[in-house]
Image: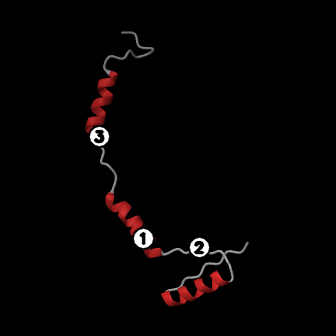
Amino acid sequence: MTQITINLPDQDEAKWLLDLLNRLQVSYQVSNNSEQYERARAVIMRGANSLDVDKMLESIEDSRKGRKHPFREV
């Protein structure tokens, strides 16, 4: 199998080429960079849930309070 990448800035040329590929029954894959860019930008702008580090550390300290420590003679 041979893979060819073509960048076409003109939508009319892209439509013409896709019509030709359909007539020849050639499989193809279309990638629109502006759509990918917008999708990636939306994911970044949504962001991740922020972590409350102080609350997480407090939880860890609370879970360790009653625990026995191995190899320690108290």
Mark 1 residue crowding within 10 angstroms, few (<14) / some (14–19) / many (20+): few
**Quadrant of residue 14 within the rendered picture:** bottom right
Residue 14 vs residue 54: left or right?
right
Q: Is residue 38 above or below residue 51?
A: below
Q: Amino acid at mark 3?
A: Val
Q: Is residue 10 visible?
A: no
By what rule are the colours in the image chosen? secondary structure
Instruction: Residue 65: give x, y in percent of width and height.
Output: 31, 20
Alpha carbons under labels 3 and 2: distance apart: 44 Å
Closest to the observer, 8 or 62: 8
| Residue at the spot 27% in from the left edge and 42% down from the top edge | 52
Does residue 17 appear left or right of residue 71 in this picture?
Answer: right
Residue linked to disc 2: 29
User: What SS does tag 3 mark?
Assistant: helix
Picture coordinates of residue 37 (x, y %)? Answer: 42, 70
Q: Residues within 10 Å of mark 3 (few under 14, many from 20)?
A: few
Comes first in the chain, label 2 or label 1: 2
Q: Which residue is mark 3?
A: 53
Residue 35 percent across, percent down from the top left = 43, 72
Q: Amino acid at mark 1?
A: Tyr
Three-letter code for the amino acid on which mark 2 is drawn: Gln
50 relative to 4, above or below: above
Which residue appears at 40% of the width and 17% of the height?
69
> What residue did someone put label 1 on?
37
Crowding around mark 2 (Cα neighbors within 10 Å: few <14, some 14 to 19, many 20+) is: few
Q: Residue 67 location in percent, x, y?
A: 36, 17
Callout 3 touching callout 2 (CB < 8 Å) = no
What residue sits 29% from the left and 25% below the top? 62
Which label is found at residue 16?
none
In the image, farthest residue toward the front: 23
